[in-house]
């Protein structure tokens, strides 16, 4: 079976992001519930409004999800569904540090990065252009 590799279009990238967003929000609820149970057990308080527990859970869960799945050749569930794969331009493994940098830059440049993709000759987002990465779409043909 021959595999063709091409850059994904903006539609499939947005759909992949949307799918990942649903998964990350579900993880927020799960980790938030676990954190609140542990907090309640350790502090015996019912008032959670004076804690930074919510923002900490959201930041840690999102960071761990994306850095884990983007590093060392792994891909998120949404990327697997849409046949996307993150690669380095120089064929090195993508480390946790690079994956974390990609997450931070994606947050900073979010919409601008996608618009950049429309005008880029290699169809790379601004973040991928800066970090020397590329997202490819594997298309199977027989």
Image (cartoon, grey):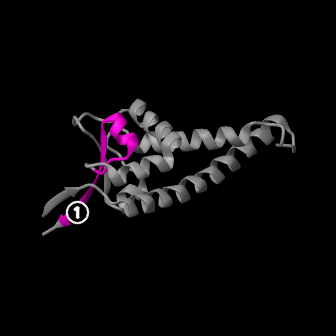
Residue at 30% from the left image edge and 36% from the top image edge: 132
Q: Quadrant of the C terminus?
A: bottom left
Q: Position of residue 44 (x, y in %)?
A: 86, 39
Residue at 55% from the left image edge and 59% from the top image edge: 22
Q: Is residue 54 inside the magenta stretch?
A: no
Q: Is residue 83 left or right of residue 42?
A: left
* Front in this rendered view, residue 106 or 16: 106
Q: Position of residue 76 (x, y in %)?
A: 41, 51
Q: Position of residue 50 (x, y in %)?
A: 84, 37
Q: Quadrant of residue 14?
A: bottom left
Query: Within 10 angstroms of label 1, few (less than 14), some, or many (20 or more) residues?
Result: some
* Front in this rendered view, residue 93 or 16: 16
Q: Quadrant of residue 84?
A: bottom left
Pointer 1 residue: 139
Q: Position of residue 31 (x, y in %)?
A: 64, 47
In the rendered view, tell whether residue 105 sits above or below residue 13: above
In the rendered view, tell whether residue 88 sits above or below residue 85: above
Residues drawn in magenta: 123-140
Q: Is residue 133 inside the magenta stretch?
A: yes
Residue at 52% from the left image edge and 42% from the top image edge: 107
């Amino acid at each position: 079976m021959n595999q063709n590799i091409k850059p994904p279009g903006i539609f499939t990238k947005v759909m992949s992001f949307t799918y990942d967003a649903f998964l990350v929000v579900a993880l927020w609820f799960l980790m938030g519930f676990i954190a609140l149970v542990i907090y309640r057990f350790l502090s015996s308080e019912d008032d959670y409004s004076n804690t930074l527990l919510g923002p900490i859970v959201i930041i840690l869960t999102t960071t761990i999800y994306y850095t884990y799945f983007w590093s060392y050749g792994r891909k998120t569930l949404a990327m697997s569904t849409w046949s996307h794969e993150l690669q380095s331009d120089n064929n090195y493994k993508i480390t946790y540090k690079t994956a974390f940098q990609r997450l931070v830059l994606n947050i900073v440049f979010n919409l601008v990065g996608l618009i950049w993709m429309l005008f880029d000759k290699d169809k790379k987002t601004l973040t991928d252009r800066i970090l020397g990465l590329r997202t490819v779409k594997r298309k199977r043909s027989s």
